[in-house]
Each structure stands twice: as C-alpha cells, then as structure tokens.
Amino acid sequence: MKFLFINGVNLNMTGVREKGVYGTQTLEQINADIAARFSGDECEFFQSNCEGDICTKLHQADCDGIILNAGAFTHYSYAIRDAIASISIPVIEVHMSNVFKRESFRHESVISEVCAGTIVGFGKNSYILAAQSFKL
Ligand code: DQA
C-alpha cells in the first residue's frame, strides 16, 4: 500500500519540545521507525508549519491512505478540514498524546468529522496503528 504521513505545525520540534509529552525521538527517527515497520509498503512523509501547504499536499495526494497529525491546526483549522473533505482518499487523524487528558482546548477537533477515524495517545504507535488499520 501507499501511505502518506502528514505532520503539521510544531511536529518538527518532536524530540526537542515537551519531551514528557511527546517523547525524546525526533520526527526523523519516528519516521524511520515507521518506514522500517512498513518496509513492504510505500511511505511518504511530509511536515509543514504552514496550513496552506498542508491543504495543497492533501489536494495533490495520490495514495491509498493518509495519516494526519495536524498538531494544533486540529483544533481550529477549517481550511484543513475542508481540504480533507475535498478529497476521496481516507484520512486518519492521529495524535501522539492523549489530547483528552490535556487542556480543554485540545478536546475539540474540527477535523474528526471528516476523517475516517481517530487514534490518540499512543505516541509513535498512533501513526503505526493508523497505517495498520488501512490493512484490515
Ligand atoms: C498533538 C496534540 C495537539 O494538541 C498539539 O497541538 C500538538 C501535537 C499530538 O500529537 O499529541 O502539536 O497533535
């Protein structure tokens, strides 16, 4: 299968910022672990801190499934929500942390309604569980 992993705003700081929440591995290390796990599949990784770039990447996607950690955009980006709604490839929303155990503003996602499913709270494994679910 062909997977596209998209990480949004501040996810490039993974392994550097709030290590108690997001762990000590960098995004590059996490992506390498994911790619190794899905060595029989094609994995593309994209990260951007810019909302519009994420929308464009979604518009141009050509794959079987998209795994999206939109970061804080999750909680307020109607642009990313509309971009997800405008494509037919299924998108799974993921979060490394358990957003429901955190601040109340993180409890709301404006993208969940247009995603195929949501996986939260399993660190790096949130991405892996999401990709695996496309194979079920
Ligand atoms: C996050 C949770 C978001 O609330 C936060 O803004 C992030 C990361 C997560 O992976 O747990 O940047 O999406």
Image: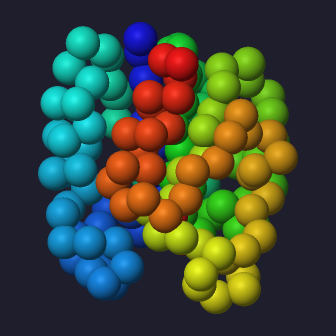
Q: Give residue 104's quadrant in the image.
A: bottom right
In the orientation shown, which residue stands out farthest toward the front? 136
Residue 54 appearing in the image: no
Asked whether, in this view, residue 19 is left or right of residue 50, the answer is: left
Residue 116 visible from this viewpoint: yes
**Apparent side of residue 113 relative to residue 52 in the rendered image (left or right):** right
Q: Position of residue 83 (x, y in %)?
A: 73, 38
Which residue sits at x=26%, y=72%?
23
Please tell me how many numbered marks the rendered image carries.
0
Name the residue rendered at 79%, 28% in the picture.
86
Quadrant where the image shows the N terminus:
top left
In which image quadrant can residue 12 be found? bottom left
Residue located 34% across and 72% down the image: 22
Tell me the quarter of the image containing the C terminus.
top right
Is 115 located above or below residue 4 in the figure? below
Tell me: residue 104, above or below residue 113. below
Q: What kind of colouring is applied to the model shown?
A: rainbow
Residue 29 coordinates in the image, percent (x, y) = 16, 51
* 38 shown above or below 114: above
Within the image, what quadrant is residue 88 found in?
Answer: top right
Asked whether, in this view, residue 129 is left or right of residue 98, the answer is left
Residue 93 lies, in percent from the top left, at 61, 47
Check the image and report above or below for 42 versus 132: above
**Image location (x, y in percent) of residue 38:** 27, 24
Residue found 68% across the figure and 40% down from its top: 117
Q: Nearer the viewer, residue 136 or 94?
A: 136
Say which of 1 and 80 sits in front.
Answer: 1
